[in-house]
Image: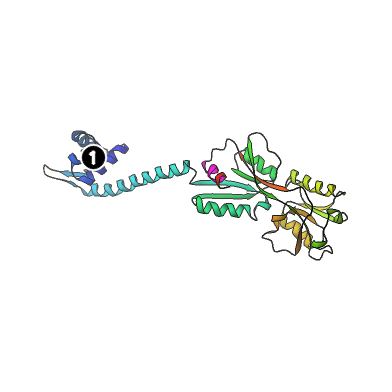
Amino acid sequence: MELRHLYYFKAVASELNFRKAAGRLFISQPGLSRQIRQLEEELEVTLFDRDQRKVNLTAAGVYLKGEVDFLLNHLETIKGQLHQIQGGKIGELRIGFLGSASNQIIPRLMSRLNVFQPLVSVNLEELSNSLQVEMVQNDKLDLGFVRLGSVPEGLEIKTIARDTFSLVVPQNHPIKAHEFKSMSQFKEESFILFSSDYSNFYYDQIIGICRDAGFSPKIQHKSVHALTIFKLIESGLGVAIVPTSIQEGYEINVRFMEIPHLSQFTELAVIWKTGNRNPVLNQVLALL
C-alpha cells in the first residue's frame, strides 16, 4: 500500500463515481479502477459495491473512509507543523542565565515569547558564566545571558543591557544616600562579592572600582547568588557592589545606593554558537 492509494480511495469515496474521481485526480478511469483493486487486494476486503448505474461504499469502505480522512488530515497538520518548526515557530529553546538576568530581562523575554511565539517552550537554568560558555559550545544550551568582555572563537556575543553599579549596605548603616560621595568612605568595610566563578570579568570590575577609590577591598565572603549576598549584608556582615537593577524582586532589609561619579558600568550580554541549527534561536534573537 502506498499513500497514493489512500488519496485515490478518498476521491472515489467522496464522489461515488469513478469517472468524476478520475477527472479530479487527473488520471484515467481504468488506471483509477486498477489502483482501487490493488488496495482491496492488499487489505483483503471489498471497499465498493459496483454496478453499471452506481457505486456505494461497503461497511468496510465506510469505516476506511473515516480513518483515511483522519490520516490525511493529520498528514496536512504534520506538514504545517514541520513548516512552523523550520521557521522557528514551534520548538524548544535552552537558555542559561546569571541570577542578575532573572529580575527583568528573562521575565520580559518570556512575556514577549508568550505573545509572539506561544508554541515555543523554554528550558531555563541558572548557571555561571564559564559553564554557560562551555554548554553553548557543546550544544547543550542555545542561548546564554552572561557578563563577559569576550567569548571564544565560534561564539557570538551581543550586549542587551547596560547598568550602573550600586553599593548595598545594611538598612541601619550610618552613611545615608545623600552623604555618599565616594567609595573611599567604605575602605574599612568588609566586602561580600560575587565569586569569580560567577564572572571573572565582573569580579575584576568590582576590584577595579575599589582600587580607583584608593583601596583594596577586604573580602570577607563570596557567593554566586545575589540573595545570599543580600542576606549576609542584612545580618551586618559587610557591604557589596552590585548592578543597580539587581535590587528588583527581593524583599530584603538592605539599602541600595548608586555609586556617584563612576565611569564604569556593567553590561549584560547574550551569547550563542555561530553554527547553532535550532531554528527557534533566530526568532528569539529577533525579539531580544
Residue found at the very far left of the displayed protein: 52
Residue 97 percent location from the top left of the image: 65, 48
234 relative to 3, above or below: below
Tag 1's secondary structure?
Answer: helix
Q: Residue at x 81, y 48 (%)?
A: 209
Residue 89 percent location from the top left of the image: 48, 46
Residue found at the very far front of the displayed protein: 261
Res 173 → quadrant: bottom right
Q: Residue at x 24, y 49 (%)?
A: 62
Res 154 → quadrant: top right
Please give left or right for residue 252 compared with residue 51 in the image: right
Q: Provide the residue designation for mark 1.
A: 24
Its colouring scheme is rainbow
Res 28 → quadrant: top left
| Along the line of sight, the residue nearer the viewer: 260 or 267 | 260
- Does the magenta portion include 280? yes
> Disc 1 residue type?
Arg
Residue stretch in magenta: 274-284
Q: Residue at x 74, y 46 (%)?
A: 202
